[in-house]
Image (cartoon, rainbow, N blue to C red):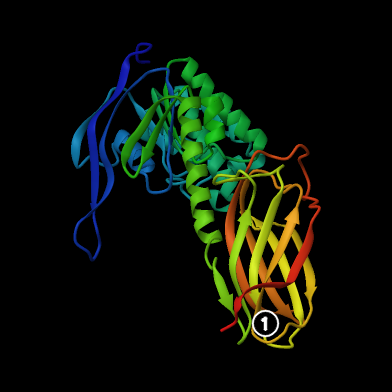
Amino acid sequence: MTAARELAIVADALGKRYPRAGASGDVVALDGVSFAARTGERIGVIGRNGSGKSTLLQLVAGVASPTSGRIDVQGSVSAVLTLGMGLREDLTGRQNVDVDAALRNIPRERWAATADAVLEFAELGDFGDRPIKTYSTGMKARLAFAMLVTIDPEILLIDETLSVGDFRFSQKATARMQELCDRGSLVMIVSHGVEGLRSLCDRCIWLDRGRLRADGPAAEVIDAYLEEVRRDDERTALERFARGVGERSLAEGWRLTQLAIEQPHARGALRGAAPAAISVTLEVPPGASGSLVLEVVRLDGLEVYSCACDLEPVTRGRARRATLRTPRLGLGPGMFRVTCTLAQASQPRAEASAIIEVEHPPELTGGLPALDVAWRVLAHEVTGEAP
């Protein structure tokens, strides 16, 4: 074993590019990544898809060469970059264990005492002496993992294996990796299951589009990463949520305009526990009747409130202002889409919608809002002649 806390990996301005098929320019997988790792460390590598995580492990393992920069690795490396890869389908589990030992130049007398432990750790039962082609995907993964961690590697690289097997086996695999680290091994793990890394790793490297975004204590880096993912996901959801917001006339002579959501003393975001008013200008064909519908939908698509009122036929050329008032908005903090719809015989004729943000949750939380509301359609409030 390498001496405790000795530098095992040094990466300096590491870069990796791949030619872009059928197009000019290269695909940049890594760009100027530098870090140092010591024996005994448990390092998680996190980032979105395409951030360069697997490429980094391939460079450390020596299965790929950097395009720029340098990487120095001291110690024997055992890597599982794709669980199950390299297993011979025509051989039994035990025979695959023997072949793996031979490839690693492990003396047979030493390995003979270890082979049973590998099969036992993999929980293969009678399948240990059956061909790999009879194994399920999970059995292959457990065997590959057991073969990797039973030989006490100096540097252990694992790509997406925290989910090996069921929950119980995953817990056992995590405990095994902790044992390796306690004995001085350096473990680097790539995983999208960042909460698993939080408990296993003492350090995390965050890659973002091939660049080193952060390198530090696991909990701090994971929290920062998850917060950015949350903000990005919320931004994407909001963009999708806001599509179609505005005014639409779906039938001639029907219009909704000037939708406004107002609250006394509000600046920007509305307050969930304060009074509010929603008003809109409506126009319908002369003599037509219908209904005005209000819907409030949360960012995640849940409809949290709806109500409707009937409209009396109007005189020719009149536009009216309809107002919804509530003494308490009753919405929790978040983003909502407010939509007013003019309908006739349950068929929409015109729509107007807007996005609102609510802050300061109401005193009571949980469940759907119970709004104390009352529509007031002001038939004599003429706001202008209809075109």
Q: Residue 245 or 58: which is nearer the viewer? A: 245
Residue most extreme to the top: 4
Based on the displayed image, in which of its 4 quarters is residue 34 positioned?
Answer: top left
Q: Residue 221 or 353: which is nearer the viewer? A: 353
Locate the N terminus by quadrant.
top left
Q: In this figure, which residue is indicated by the disc labeled 1?
A: 284
Whole-percent x and y of residue 320? Answer: 67, 73
Give the residue type that dot 1 points to. Answer: Val
Whole-percent x and y of residue 294? Answer: 71, 65
User: Residue 242 vs residue 185: left or right?
Assistant: right
Residue 130 seen in render = no
Q: Tag 1, which secondary structure? A: loop
User: Residue 189 vs residue 164: left or right?
Assistant: left
Locate the C terminus by quadrant.
bottom right
- Residue at 42% from the left image edge and 17% from the top image edge: 40
- Residue at 60% from the left image edge and 87% from the top image edge: 252
- Residue at 75% from the left image edge and 62% from the top image edge: 306
Whole-percent x and y of residue 55? Answer: 33, 42
Q: Residue 98 or 286: which is nearer the viewer? A: 286
Q: How many marks?
A: 1
Whole-percent x and y of residue 184? Answer: 43, 16
